[in-house]
Amino acid sequence: MRGALFRDIAILLARLVFGVIFLVHGLQKLTVDGYAGTKAGFEGMDVPVPAVTAFIATWAEILGGISLILGLFVPVFGVLLFLDMLGAYLFVHMGNGVYVSDGGWELVGALGLGSLLLAAVGSGAFGLDRFLAPRMRFPARR
């Protein structure tokens, strides 16, 4: 019983922290940089199809962040956020070493693999997946 409670609290804390980070990064793209600024930034980093990828990254991070915070559709958004961070790694950070201060991959690696881990374990006992989708086979329902 204690192990399950510890696990669910750890999942909740991870979901909240990762969710807030993704949400604020998505909102920054939307409200601070704006679509034009985000698209221009993606063009400058040679991200393929910047008009599309800027839109997708912005909304994946906003909706994915909200999803993680609420614990709703965590397996789906966990994978989408992992793919978002994989793209950031491949197109922006891969050749820059590890350290974020050098433009490296440490932040996108941690966020991406944390999202993938959440996709694998689900939202835990304190997520809406538990209440809104009791018949779906999310990982936490096994």
Image (cartoon, grey):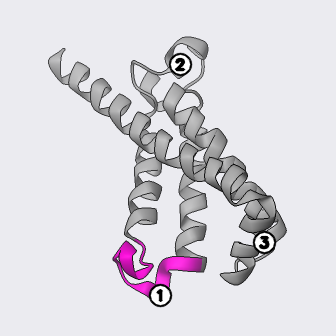
Which circle's residue, 1 or 2, is located before the other in the chain?
A: 1
Q: Which residue is mark 1?
A: 95
Q: Quadrant of residue 9?
A: top left
Amino acid at the residue labelled 1: Gly
Mark sitting earlier along the chain (1/3): 3
Residue at x 50% of width, y 17% of height: 130
Crowding around mark 3 (Cα neighbors within 10 Å: few <14, some 14 to 19, many 20+) is some
Bounds of the magenta segment: 92-105
Amino acid type of the residue that numbered disc 2 sits on in the rendered structure: Leu
Magenta stretch encompasses residue 99: yes
Tell whether position 64 is magenta: no
Question: Residue 127, relative to residue 20: is it above or below?
Answer: above
- Residue that mark 3 sits on: 50
The kind of residue on which mark 3 rests is Pro
Relative vertical location of residue 42 with respect to residue 128 in this rendering, above or below: below
Between the residue at mark 2 and the residue at mark 3, the CA separation in whole angstroms equals 34 Å
Badge 3 marks a residue whose secondary structure is: helix
User: Is residue 132 among the parts visible in the rendering?
Assistant: yes
Q: CA distance from mark 1 to mark 3?
A: 20 Å
Q: Residue at x 41, y 64 (%)?
A: 107
Q: Is there CB contact under 8 Å for labels 1 and 3? A: no
Residue sitting at x 67%, y 55%: 32
